[in-house]
Image (cartoon, coloured by chain):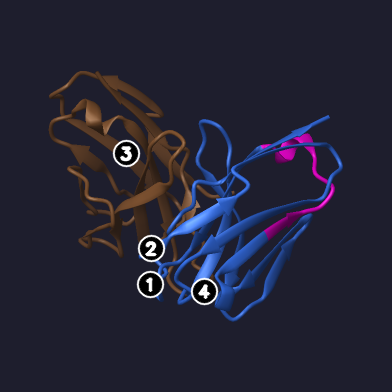
Chain colours: A blue, B brown
Amino acid sequence: KQEVTQIPAALSVPEGENLVLNCSFTDSAIYNLQWFRQDPGKGLTSLLLIQSSQREQTSGRLNASLDKSSGRSTLYIAASQPGDSATYLCAPAEGYNTDKLIFGTGTRLQVFP
Amino acid sequence: EADIYQTPRYLVIGTGKKITLECSQTMGHDKMYWYQQDPGMELHLIHYSYGVNSTEKGDLSSESTVSRIRTEHFPLTLESARPSHTSQYLCASSEWGGRETQYFGPGTRLLVL
């Protein structure tokens, strides 16, 4: 059974810092992995999707890497801003069934001015 | 910006009442999903659908039921609400093939007294 762990659980940093959020998963037989952000009281916003054949994806100040064999993914946030404050969730797609995302409990990020 | 809607956003209701949580999407996606999220906990898939007249149970056992009579609509029903059903319910959709990113609605926060 796939288990997802995200470290750290919470992070508070001053504006401008470069950040690394870590995600580890126990079953490396995944089809893809998505990173989401969740704002309080709101749904999830998809940030990046990495296919199992890819090693990284970039979108603006965000860069996600995937090392499937070791069961790890990282989300790199460059030049953090207060608007980046949210909970970041990692979700590998279970096995090769892309319908079943397995979520971690997330990293709660606060960026202060 | 994904066009997926959930109503109501918040619901406080007494034990034993029947409730229906609405989810609609205007993107023409065939796949739709319901997730349950308790405060501070992971999202868990409770139902999904591949298209009209298709419904499947997710990994987390739920007393709720779903229906898919129209492509754009995927309501979730609890026949008799209990305090243990108190949670946040998130609806999502995705298309076949391609990147299969899941797009989420804003969620419904349910409190059963």
User: In this figure, which residue is indicated by the disc labeled 4?
Assistant: B98
Q: Which residues are magenta?
A: A75-85
Amino acid type, mark 3: Glu
Alpha carbon distance from label 1 to label 3 = 26 Å
Amino acid type, mark 1: Asn
- Could you say whether the residue bearing mark 2 is in a helix, strand or loop? loop
Alpha carbon distance from label 4 to label 1 = 14 Å
Query: Given this view, does label 2 or label 4 mark the residue nearer the observer?
Result: 2
Residue B99's tag is none
Amino acid type, mark 2: Lys
User: In this figure, which residue is indicated by the disc labeled 1?
Assistant: A97
Alpha carbon distance from label 2 to label 4 = 16 Å
Q: Is residue B16 magenta?
A: no
Image coordinates for residue A6, horizontal then vertical, percent: 56, 52
Residue shown at 45%/66% (left/top)? A93
Whether labels 2 and 4 belong to a single chain: the reply is no
- Could you say whether the residue bearing mark 1 is in a helix, strand or loop? loop
Alpha carbon distance from label 4 to label 3 = 27 Å
Chain under callout 4: B
Residue shown at 55%/46% (left/top)? A106
Query: Given this view, does label 4 or label 1 mark the residue nearer the observer?
Result: 1
Q: Relative to B94, is B45 on the left or the right?
A: left
Quadrant (top left, top right, bottom left, bottom right) of the C terminus of chain B: top left
Residue shown at 52%/55% (left/top)? A5
Q: Which of the two discs, 4 and 3, labels the residue nearer the N terminus?
A: 3
Asked whether the residues under the numbered discs 2 and 4 touch, taking CB atoms below 8 Å apart as contact, a structural biologist would say no
Residue shown at 22%/50% (left/top)? B61
User: In this figure, which residue is indicated by the disc labeled 3?
Assistant: B22
Residue A100's tag is 2
Image coordinates for residue A92, horizontal then vertical, percent: 49, 64
Chain under callout 2: A
Q: Quarter-wise, where is residue B39 in the image?
A: top left
